[in-house]
């Protein structure tokens, strides 16, 4: 390997940890990466899920590719729907089901 190539490779290795931040290697699955999405609240999360579903509905009913000159390829509906599945707060929904009877009982006790 030439000296210039070695220097370029060393430079890339120094830069990579600081610049490759969006995708992180998934330690549980080989050849897989994770990206973190941050939300300020469950309301924002649910709103985002709703918007993604509306996007899929719109694409299913109308051709989004023909709607804008900036859309160069067809929308990957399957990919968006898979993302939605990952975003759904299923565990939190189970917790809400557990909390509801408790709150109902507390409400009943406070009125008597």
Image (spheres, rainbow, N blue to C red):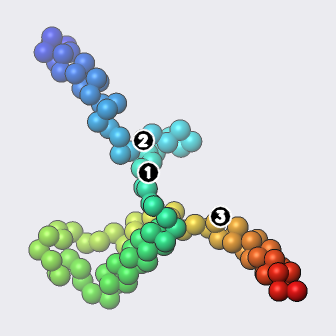
Residue 40 position by quadrant: bottom left
Quarter occupied by the N terminus: top left
Tell me which residue sits at (44%, 69%) in the image: 44
As drawn, the label of residue 24 is 2
State if disc 2 and disc 1 touch (CB < 8 Å). Answer: yes
- Residue furthest out toward the top: 3
- Mark 3, residues whose alpha carbon is within 10 Å: few (<14), some, or many (≥20)? few
Which secondary structure, mark 2?
strand
State if disc 2 and disc 3 touch (CB < 8 Å). Answer: no
Q: Earlier in the sequence, mark 3 or mark 2?
A: 2
Q: Using the image, determine if residue 50 lies above or below residue 76.
A: below
- How many angstroms separate mark 1 from mark 2 (CA)? 9 Å
As drawn, the label of residue 85 is none
Where residue 31 sits: x, y (%)? 45, 42
Choose between 99 and 10: the one closer to the eye: 99
Residue behind mark 1: 36
Where residue 18 sits: x, y (%)? 31, 32
């Amino acid at each position: 390997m030439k000296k210039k190539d070695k220097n370029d490779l060393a430079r890339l290795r120094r830069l990579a940890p600081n610049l490759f931040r969006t995708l992180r290697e998934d330690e549980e699955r080989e050849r897989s990466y994770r990206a973190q999405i941050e939300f300020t609240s469950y309301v924002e999360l649910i709103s985002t899920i709703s918007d993604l579903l509306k996007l899929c509905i719109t694409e299913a009913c109308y051709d989004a590719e023909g709607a804008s000159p900036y859309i160069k390829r067809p929308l990957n509906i399957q990919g968006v729907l898979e993302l939605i599945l990952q975003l759904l707060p299923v565990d939190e929904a189970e917790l809400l089901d557990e909390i509801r009877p408790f709150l109902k009982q507390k409400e009943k006790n406070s009125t008597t």
